[in-house]
Image (spheres, coloured by chain):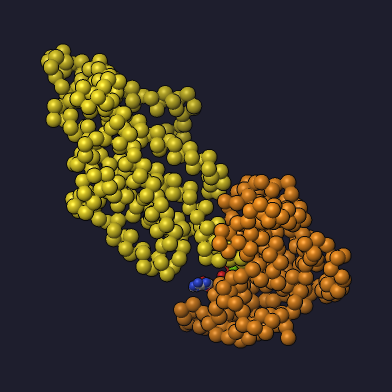
Chain colours: A orange, B yellow
Amino acid sequence: MSFIQVRNVWQQYGDQTVLENLRLDIDQGEFCALVGASGCGKSTFLRMLLGQERPHRGQILLDDKPLVAEPDPSRGIVFQRYSVLPHLSVLDNVALGLELPRAPLLGRLFGRAKAEARTQAAQLLRRVGLDHALDKYPSQLSGGMQQRLAIAQALIMKPRMLLLDEPFGALDPGIRKDMHALLLELWQETGLTVLMVTHDLSEGFTLGTRLLVFDKVRNDPQAPGAYGARITYDLPLNLDRRATREAVAALPAHVTGALKTA
Amino acid sequence: MRLINRKPGPSWRISLAMLPFALLLVAYLAGSAARLAENPQDKLLPSVVQMADAVERMAFKEDPRSGRYLLWDDTAASLKRLAMGLAIAAALGLSLGILAGSLPLFGAALSPLLTVVSMIPPLAILPVLFIVFGLDELSKVMLIVLGITPVIARDLEQRAREIPAELLIKAQTLGANTWTLILRVVLPQLLPRLLIALQLALGSAWLFLIAAEAIASTDGLGYRIFLVRRYLAMDVILPYVAWITLLAWLMDLGLKRLTRAAFPWYEGGRA
Ligand SMILES: Nc1ncnc2c1ncn2[C@@H]1O[C@H](COP(=O)(O)OP(=O)(O)OP(=O)(O)O)[C@@H](O)[C@H]1O
Ligand SMILES: [Mg+2]
């Protein structure tokens, strides 16, 4: 069965229906780009996948099991803003993900374990091009660097699924291009399943192996909240890239780079 | 240029800051000189020399009856009460603020209580404190604690609520449980706010301290002021008030500097 199965999911707030009857199967390693008008429920869909909210009706299965109903390390997220912790340095922002699961009492590691976590975090930060800024605080970074940091922070957990909610929405076009390249490389290397919300259709076309379009098909002018959005188009994209990724996934672990083996 | 667009340069800024103080001082000196010329026994506006004498007597000569240096004894007693009150209030306020602000279940129970408790005028329950805790140190410290804890707790509760939900979710995806989330995300982000809340509560803390000392004490800055009031000893009262003001100002400055030095990410994080 598919990695993620969305079974007739509805979401509503009060009497406003936001999403109606979503049915979707997503395989491991797919890169889904989610597009749609503002306010049609894309972020809502990601929040449900993250476990931040429950569907009003229907069910989401992960590996045939009901989704854990609160955020956990198996699902990474990058928001448009507020993705990194302002009070931690770049290095600590990433090392935190190695410390928290292993230190349920103090939330931090000491001595050799700490040094190891920091080395590992520094390696990943080099991979996203932040090795020159390890000791900086996020407020001292540019928008693009902050998003690189947020991505590294999510990847250190080796999540099975990476959710991106307009991660590059606030970046200017040149930097956005660099970010696209980086994200694609990381996706190739890690075998992650990625779901990315974007307002930029061309971004969706360039990056995705699948494009999901959210739209309201029914509209009652008397009751604007009566109907929600559905997935109206589900297009396969960049088939070559999908094939490449599958080929890479078939390679033995020791040749596929630091991320997979780290 | 319009007035709203005119800004003082650095040297102007200092001169402008000094100006009101200088004017007040000149007005005082003139008033004092005029009154003393009319009646050398006048007590209301003592001259600088009279006040210097009083300071000399209080700070640098042993008190003939107790054999102690009163100003320093008073200062030590008051600062000890103040420090204890502030420390307890900070710890309580921080804990309550974090509980109420970041755990909805606790918030539901604590927020209304904090709101109501913060409406109680602390001085109105001072007699209760004296009855319950006796007339010694504890009741004075408790007055400060009761007076400023609700304010600090409510401020921090609000700040904890203002931490973007994204950060709390992010921390959970990084493997935090409730406890480590509070320890590594909420607490560090609230510590600079705590220092600022303390800075703002400092004025009230001094108020409660002086009030408690005035009513029931045998030492302390507030006790001394209210004691010598009986003899209209303005030459002691005015230097004491100036001393208290200086102490309060230094504490305010210290907290500000500490916030900056200990939390370098904080000011930048606002931008
Ligand atoms: N917690 C909530 N309570 C009530 N209404 C909500 C809530 N969250 C979202 N909504 C509503 O659900 C609708 C969809 O919101 P959502 O944020 O998912 O849209 P979106 O597709 O991500 O939009 P955008 O592209 O602007 O980010 C909006 O109309 C919003 O007002
Ligand atoms: Mg959105």
A179 on left or right of B141: right
Instruction: Find residue B224 and report its image quarter.
Output: top left
Image point (72%, 83%), residue name: A2
The vertical placement of B238 against A195, above or below, is above
Image point (23%, 51%), residue name: B133
Image point (80%, 61%), residue name: A258
Image point (33%, 25%), residue name: B21
Q: Quadrant of the N terminus of chain A?
A: bottom right
The percent position of residue A73, horizontal first and vertical second, equals 64, 68
Give the image quadrant in which the ligand numbered 1 is located: bottom right
A218 on left or right of A151: left
Res. A240 visible in picture: no
The percent position of residue B28, horizontal first and vertical second, equals 25, 22
Foreground pick, B210 / B70: B70
Instruction: Find residue B4 and report its image quarter.
Output: top left
The vertical placement of B221 against A189, above or below, is above
Q: Quadrant of the C terminus of chain A?
A: bottom right
The percent position of residue A195, horizontal first and vertical second, equals 69, 71
The percent position of residue B152, horizontal first and vertical second, equals 38, 52
Foreground pick, B136 / B44: B136
B67 on left or right of A96: left
